[in-house]
Image (cartoon, rainbow, N blue to C red):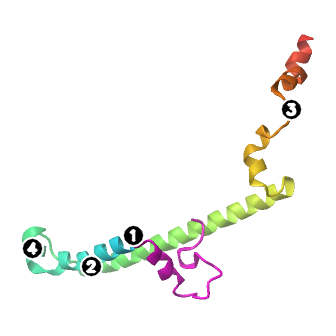
Amino acid sequence: MRRSFFRMQPKSNKYLTQWAYDVWRNQFLFWAVIAGFVTIFPTLYIPVINHVVFKHEGITWEWGVVFIEAILFFGGVEAWKWAKRIFFRRRRAGTQAEKGNDLESKVFGKYMSFRSAESEERSSPETEKKL
């Protein structure tokens, strides 16, 4: 996933809301995030659950830390994806000038030769030294 979370489909007409459509397609992840988000507030702020069951107090100023860390996390992830896109774009530009854009020949090129193994053994430098 090299594309930005907010621009996974660059040719979309829904510029500001396309991310919501993309997240909605993974129903299990969507509902897991919603359930986690909804259960946080009762756990932290309902007095019986808060004090008796979990034995803690609700958070106040710590929400600022949560939001700042979330912003830093998303910023870091997006910066990492941007750096990877730049790296692979430059790497691809260098390799396309040399070989072309054929994935099959990149992966299986050394196996696609029509020469037989016997002829390769006969023409190898080690066999020429023996002769």
Q: CA distance from mark 1 to mark 3?
A: 51 Å
Image quadrant in which you'd find residue 46? bottom left
Quadrant of the rendering where the N terminus is positioned = bottom right
- The residue nearer to you, when weighing 115 against 37, is 115
* Residue underneath mark 2: 38
Is residue 17 a member of the stretch shown in magenta?
yes
Image quadrant in which you'd find residue 29? bottom left
Q: Earlier in the sequence, mark 2 or mark 4?
A: 2
Task: Give the SS element for disc 2.
Answer: helix
Residue 44, above or below 93? below
Tell me what residue is drawn at x 62 percent, y 83 percent: 12
Task: Give the SS element for disc 3.
Answer: loop
2 or 4: mark nearer the eye:
2
Quadrant of the rendering where the C terminus is positioned = top right
User: Does residue 103 appear left or right of residue 8 in this picture?
Assistant: right
Q: Amino acid at mark 1?
A: Leu
Residue 40 on image: x %, y %? 24, 75
Q: Amino acid at mark 3?
A: Arg
- The residue nearer to you, when weighing 9 against 27, is 27
Residue 30 on image: x %, y %? 39, 74
User: Given contact means CB atoms under 8 Å apart, are the residues at marks 3 and 2 in contact?
Assistant: no
* Residue underneath mark 3: 115
Which residue range is magenta in the image? Answer: 1-27
Q: Earlier in the sequence, mark 2 or mark 1?
A: 1
